[in-house]
């Protein structure tokens, strides 16, 4: 898996970097989170036959960003693949194991979680990036659900939890279910994003990526700090 991460990182060109920057990902975050790119070709991965079969030996991975998913200790144990062109919606996940939490941004968030005893949960990778610059405890659960392995991890590390899931029915349901089920374990906060419109749309924003596009980095930072206080 580490070989695939290095290969994908080496594939990034200015086209993919510009596309990431346009979605709120800085160059520093590209490096820190080891974001890469694949277009139907793979390095020599003969020892990873299961992945080769799953990916149809790379042909399934058509013009895609590679987002490594890690354990809390930083081992790459999965990937999310997302199309570079935003018009091509959808994504696909691959996991080596799910015996423990394998999530996007988890390893990067752990040091700040130890220090602050708090965690900020979002749904997807592109929800994470605009917030992570201001709140380093953020990680993506990859869906609007806090699974029991993640709850066990949070019990060891956090006293305060912010649920920054999307402002849609599924995201709200997951957030309030967490408060209902685990309100005795944590000081839990459901994040409400401002009721403003997406850029160039009549739709209200529903996630941190939309908020960043509408407000920009500085104002998003102010919003985050009103929620959690200044980063320690």
Image (cartoon, rainbow, N blue to C red):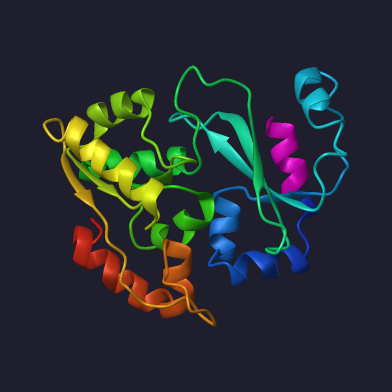
Towards the viewer: 40 or 88:
88
The x and y percentages for residue 129 are 48, 58
Q: Find residue 232 and report its image quarter.
A: bottom left
Where 99 falls versus 31 (above or below)? above
Left or right, 20 with reference to 219: right
**Image spot of residue 150 (x, y percent):** 36, 29
**Which of the pair 176/75 is nearer the observer?**
176
27 above or below 82?
Answer: below
* Residue 99 seen from this side: yes
| Left or right: residue 180 compared with residue 4 | left
Q: How many marks?
A: 0
Q: Would you place residue 205 above or below residue 49 in this image?
A: below
Identify the residue at image location x=59%, y=64%. 27
**118 versus 49 height, above or below:** below
* Residue 119 visible: no
Name the image quarter holding the N terminus: top right
The residue located at (57%, 67%) in the rendering is 23
User: Can you give x and y, in whole percent of width and height, for residue 10 in the image?
Assistant: 77, 50
Q: Residue at x 59, y 31 (%)?
A: 76
Q: Which residues are magenta?
A: 1-9
Q: Is residue 136 left or right of 100 when viewed as pictured? A: left
Task: Based on the picture, tell me whether residue 3 belongs to the magenta stretch.
Answer: yes
Place of residue 97 in the rendered image (x, y in percent of width and height, measured from the top left): 57, 20
- Toward the left, the furthest residue is 184
């Amino acid at each position: 898996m580490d070989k695939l991460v290095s290969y994908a990182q080496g594939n990034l060109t200015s086209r993919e970097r510009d596309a990431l920057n346009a979605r709120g990902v800085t160059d520093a975050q590209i490096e820190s989170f080891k974001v890469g790119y694949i277009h139907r070709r793979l390095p020599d991965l003969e020892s990873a036959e299961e992945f080769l079969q799953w990916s149809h030996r790379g042909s399934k991975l058509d013009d895609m960003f590679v987002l490594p998913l890690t354990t809390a200790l930083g081992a790459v144990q999965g990937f999310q693949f997302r199309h570079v062109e935003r018009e091509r919606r959808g994504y696909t996940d691959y996991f080596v194991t799910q015996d423990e939490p394998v999530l996007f941004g988890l390893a990067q968030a752990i040091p700040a979680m130890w220090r602050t005893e708090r965690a900020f949960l979002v749904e997807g990778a592109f929800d994470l990036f605009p917030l992570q610059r201001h709140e380093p405890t953020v990680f993506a659960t990859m869906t609007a659900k806090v699974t029991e392995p993640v709850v066990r991890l949070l019990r060891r590390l956090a006293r305060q939890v912010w649920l920054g899931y999307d402002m849609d029915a599924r995201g709200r349901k997951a957030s309030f279910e967490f408060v209902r089920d685990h309100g005795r374990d944590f000081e839990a906060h459901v994040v409400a994003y401002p009721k403003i419109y997406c850029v160039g749309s009549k739709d209200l924003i529903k996630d941190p990526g939309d908020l960043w596009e509408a407000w920009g980095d500085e104002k998003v930072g102010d919003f985050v700090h009103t929620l959690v206080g200044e980063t320690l």
